[in-house]
Amino acid sequence: MRSVSIIGGGLSKFGERWDKSFRDLVVEAGTAAVIDAGIEGREIQAIYGGCMSSGRLVGQEHVGALFADFLGLNPIPATRCEAACASGGVALRAGYLAVASGMYDVVAVGGVEKMTDFDSADVAIALGGAGDMEHELFFGATFPALYALMARRHMLEYGTTEEMMASCSVKNHKNAVHNPYAQYHNEITIEDVMNSGYIASPLKLLDCSPITDGAAAVILCASEKAKKFRKDPVEIIASSQASDTISLSNRHCMTELHATKVAAADAYRRANLKPSDIDVAEVHDCFSIAEIMAIEDLGFFDKGKGGPASLEGLTALNSEISINTSGGLKATGHPVGATGIKQAVEIMWQLQGKADKRQVKDAEIGMTHNVGGSGATAVVNIYKRL
Amino acid sequence: MKHPLPLIWRMIPEKYYLMGSHCATCKNDFFPFRQICPNCRRLGKVSEKRMPTTGTVYSFTEVSAPPSGFEFEVPYPLAIIELDNKVKILAQIIDAPMEKIRIGSRVQMRFRRVGDDDEESAISYGYKFALIEDAASSAKTDKPAKTPKPTVSKG
Amino acid sequence: MVHAGIAGYGVYVPYMRIKIPEIAKVWGKDGDKAARGLGVYEKALGAIDEDSATFAVEAGRRAFEHCKLDPARVEAVYVGSESKPYAVKPTASIVAEALGSTPHLTAADFEFACKAGTAGIQACMGLCIAQMIDLGLAIGSDAAQGRPNDALEMTAGAGAAAYVISAKKEEQIATIEKTYSYTTDTPDFWRRSHAEFPMHAGRFTAEPAYFKHVAECAREIMKRTGTKPEDFDYFVPHQPNGKFPVRVAKLLGFTEAQVKPALVTPFIGNTYSAAAMIGLSAILDIAKPGQRILVTSYGSGAGSDGFIITVNDLIDQKRPAKARHFFELINNKTYVDYATYAKHRRKIKSM
């Protein structure tokens, strides 16, 4: 296995991109990544694309080939990766493995989702496919509902409160103000969250990540050649992935995502690091309760302490650990296939010191945590400057 | 969401009477049906088994933003139910005001239409759960009709 | 001769109720007067995810919980309804599958307005007496339909009753000694093939229809068995409202005490195919061994099925320890307004 580094990254603007098509978003992010890496298109040897629901929503399948085509990269091999909201994360890992194996020196990895063209009830159906269609969605279980079921248990077992959950959204909106790519640039208060309407009790509108259009891309390169392209590549020092039951009800425990714990343990072992070594982490806050579970499952806080830690501001920018400096899924937006890669771009910027007003001081080690469905897939990556 | 008819038909045993599976090797029950026991894999001896139809609410939520097909049912309570054999299952709770639903509430399987109905396609029926009400609890009565006091003769 | 009998019974009444004055108010009528005139105070309605098939399954399950016999033994399932969820496709097969009675059985749906359920009892009895089957299941189930602002809307209720009919004397909590039916072609109430709501002939539904058929059926079955009203402990006629059954009882010489315990329509509305069968269940809930019951259902179109039933000792043994009478069971309810009722019954045009 060779060491792999990110030599460039780019994002499309996230949000309601009425004037941009699915493929326009891919081109916007892909072009930015290629320019950032300072490479020529012909130097890219393969492409991996993460996308969850293009078929169900846009009606477009075969998006690996579409990526390659509209980025002008034919005839290189192009492969789509799908793991629901972790599609970006698994695409990134597929690219990582392809370079680590020695098969390629330079690959492009992209993720995209075009979601705002569609009615929210239809988007709920598309996202619902990330769980067990026959036993969850079939009975009217939306994704907010599944996380609400986890939240209710977390509240019962650990005394987590709706205010604690709300504080995650508040913090993420605050961070997003300084992220020009984010969907939202407005700060919100705990009262705003508490007064927003229930989507699936106890989760309210402002506990939930939005429906977003967006794309993200990174260029991966064998670390041994990375400095040829730029002086400050970011090395992926561990990439781990785990799975769990597709349906929430089959889990033994509903107050943790077991796949996150397994992937995190593997990543820490591979990187020879511990949770306290992480300076900045982009975690999968599709819902506020998901951020609380994530910071516990990733080992930043003890089980049950994620809620109080969030409320006390221990996850704010430049506090104990800086969580979701980009604004997270909540405020940057959550174009599901793009999210896992957007997280890597944010960490790249943080480790390169390019995060402007949301920069974590002396950030040395970063982490991304991307979840598919209600936790049936988790991808955890650890990064440092090469 | 419209489900294809053969899918609705295939799911009849599990949707009508909770047909799941049992592994004779590890003695665990599973729902939905699994051909492979995740504990024993090739050593598992798996056969069909009906799950018990009563259980306890393990967690619950009230869905206000529905997927398509459930627009006319909102807000509806949805729960993870721990059946009496400890197997958990997700289902809608029916015929109960939210304030009566608690973690730990006893529930019983009921037979209902599930999901979309366009008035022309085949109807999908399946399980939902109702609270098992104890004799003491009855309706919120705003001037109920006077029902006669029955004399129940006991054997 | 083998006598068929009732091995078990079960009733299902949905959770929601609407008060008759709440309906009357919408149409500018005097609600209290309407309720008093009909002798109906409130009616049950199914939720948006319920229909006569789901009612039938629930009633069937309760019937088997009651008799504790194996549903797999059932060799005939008949469901009577005038509100079938499918115009073509049996409800009986849904019920048989849900109860676990498939595949070794016959199943069919019956339609004869409000007496389709008792026709199912007769069909099961016939098969039992002919010793073609040991165990049958007959269900009357309706999510009754009434056009908005029609008189029927004030009474059309919802519910189901299921009876497990056994050929084995030792399984019978009550034996059906005799059945007889009185049938003519009298179109007092109907629903054309693709029509959404039934039509009725107003006051014509009373004398030449309900009263004539129920009374003739009762008189003839008593004549053929040499019985008189005083030979019965209870009389259970079909009950389209709270008034007709009392009047027909009086007309036939039954006392109010004989008929009143069977009156369920005032509290749940007219449950059509289920009405007489639910009325009978309310009697069986309190009946003592040795008591005799006369049942006369009524179906528009028109006919009446009569049954003479004798209660057996087994009824007390089969009564669950925490037996709850019908009138207690229907106390688990919630009241809804007309708008909610209109939504759940899909009476809002744009739905």
Image (cartoon, rainbow, N blue to C red):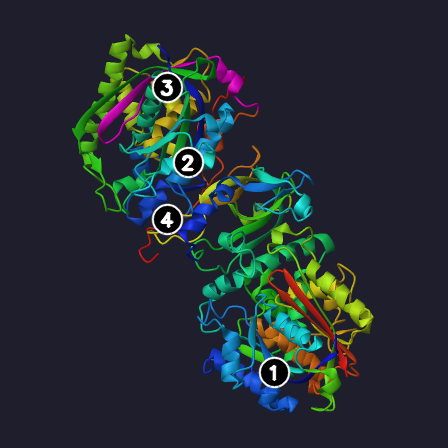
- Element at label 2: helix
CA gap between label 1 and label 2 equals 61 Å
- Are the two marked residues, 2 and 4, in contact with CB atoms closer than 8 angstroms? no
Question: Within the magenta stretch, is there residue C312?
Answer: yes
Given the image, what chain letter belongs to the residue carrying mark 3? Answer: C
Q: Which residue in the structure is indicated by mark 3?
A: C128
Q: Which residue in the structure is indicated by mark 4?
A: B122
Q: Amino acid at mark 1?
A: Gln
For discs 1 and 4, the disc positioned in front in the rendered view: 1
- Element at label 1: loop
CA gap between label 2 and label 4 equals 15 Å
Q: Relative to A22, is B105 above or below?
A: above
Q: Which residue in the structure is indicated by mark 2?
A: C95
Same-chain status of marks 2 and 3: yes
Given the image, what chain letter belongs to the residue carrying mark 1? Answer: A
Question: Residue A192: percent from the left, percent from the top?
Answer: 60, 70
Question: Residue C160: percent from the left, percent from the top?
Answer: 39, 33
Q: Amino acid at mark 3?
A: Cys
Q: Amino acid at mark 2?
A: Val
- Element at label 3: helix
